[in-house]
Amino acid sequence: MQENSVLTKEDLLRNIQAINKNLEKIISKTAKTPMNGIENLIWDLRAELEMIAIKFKVVLEKEDGKERWQKIYLDNLKGTSSLPKAITLLNETVMNSKDSVALFRKKPVESYKYYWKLKETISSIMPAFVEKKQANSTYFENSDVFEI
């Protein structure tokens, strides 16, 4: 007998809690110098946020097109490659774990908006967290940034 795996709000809550832990790691690293390993953490978080946006759409039964609030947010979003500006923008965007879980429980649609905006904000500041690579290591071009 094969079990059918249906995404539930509880699954989404577990994903939110995992993302919050990773986000807390990133925030704590931005307060320190040097920030060794932060680029990989940012990339991993960006991927997790992309997946959670899809999961929210499934659970909330949302359509796949961009909504007006998303278009407005993207039009107004200004990315940066300046590390101090990126850290400030990240800190202004991030909600603490307790509040983000409470928001999800009370207003799942608003929680979806928060995580979607967080995903886009992180995408816009990723260039600020690119670590200097040695000549023989790989480097991701801007065209390598993924969008699902």
Image (cartoon, rainbow, N blue to C red):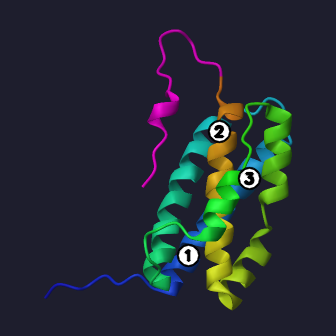
Quarter placement of the N terminus:
bottom left
| Main secondary structure along the magenta-highlighted residues | loop
Spatial CA distance of label 2 from label 3 is 17 Å
Q: Residue furthest left?
A: 1
Q: Residue at x 74, y 57 (%)?
A: 24
Q: Are marks 2 and 3 in contact (CB under 8 Å)?
A: no
Spatial CA distance of label 2 from label 1 is 25 Å
Q: What secondary structure is marked by label 2? A: helix
- Image coordinates of residue 119 in percent, x first then y, are 62, 56
Q: Are marks 3 and 1 in contact (CB under 8 Å)?
A: no
85 horizontally vs 127: left or right? right
Give me the disc on residue 76. Answer: 3
Q: What secondary structure is marked by label 3? A: helix
142 horizontally vs 35: left or right? left
The mark closer to the camera, 2 or 1, is: 2
- Image coordinates of residue 18 in percent, x first then y, are 60, 65
Q: Which residue bears the numbered disc 1?
A: 14
Earlier in the chain: of badge 3 and badge 1, it is 1
Residue 32 is a magenta residue: no
The mark closer to the camera, 3 or 1, is: 3
- Estimate how packed mark 1 is, as few (under 14), some (14 to 19) or many (20 or more) residues with alpha carbons within 10 Å: few
- Image coordinates of residue 75 in percent, x first then y, are 68, 52
Q: Residue at x 72, y 41 (%)?
A: 79
Q: Residue at x 85, y 56 (%)?
A: 92
Residue type (three-letter) at the residue carrying disc 1: Arg
